[in-house]
Amino acid sequence: MDNNIMSSVQEEMKRYIGRVLEMTKTDQQLAAMMPDPSLVALIDDPDVSYDHMIAGILDGYGTRPALGQRDYEIIRDNASGENTRNYLPSFSTISYNDVQQRVKSLASAWRDHDHHRLNTGEFMCVLGFTSLDYSIMDMACAYAQGISVPLQATLAGTDLDGIFT
């Protein structure tokens, strides 16, 4: 990339960051969303393991909203018997504490299961769509020191056969 363009982009980013920091002085909601410097240091520490990093962030942000999803209701078509999801204009969030509880519970279940245990370094294939639950599962896999292998939910059976054989 051209040095003049890079310089221009860097200057624009500096102005943007300065503007956001200035706004935090008068906007309490924005100030509450700013990263915690101690957690930024945790993330930047090369000696911190991934599972400890996840635990530190989830502990550190505690009651802050962490993940959200669009609210919906299930509508049943009485004529066809089919259910459809009707999305609402609102969103629901869960806190970092809630995320941590779910991540730890799922990771613990995987580590302690008699027949379907997830051991350190093992691969776990996941077939699904991006969602709050998908995020929880992915973090739980990392927390349990497994290796998450995301698969497209639209893959054909023959494609999946090629992956698993």
Image: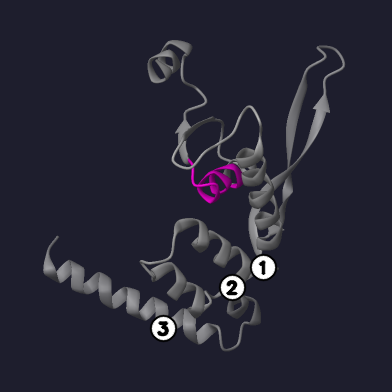
Picture coordinates of residue 55 (x, y %)? 57, 62
**Foreground of the two, 139 or 117:** 117
Q: Is residue 150 magenta?
A: no
Q: What element carries label 1?
A: loop
Q: Is residue 87 left or right of residue 115?
A: right
Q: Mark 1 points at which residue?
A: 64
Report if residue 132 is visible in the image: no
Which mark is in front, 2 or 1? 1
**Foreground of the two, 127 or 80:** 127
Q: Give the vertical position of 119 relative to 12 (above or below).
A: above
Q: Is residue 153 left or right of residue 95?
A: left
Picture coordinates of residue 90 (x, y %)? 73, 51
Which residue appears at 34% of the width and 74% of the height? 13
Q: What stretch is highlighted in magenta?
A: 136-146
Picture coordinates of residue 58 (x, y %)? 61, 63
Query: How far is mark 2 from mark 3, CA to CA?
Result: 16 Å
Q: Give the vertical position of 140 relative to 98 (above or below).
A: above
Q: Name the residue under label 3.
A: 18
**Foreground of the two, 16 or 147:** 147
Secondary structure mostly seen in the magenta stretch: helix
- The amino acid at mark 3 is Gly
Which residue appears at 14% of the width and 71% of the height? 4
Q: Mark 2 points at which residue?
A: 33
- The amino acid at mark 2 is Met
Q: Which quadrant is home to the N terminus? A: bottom left
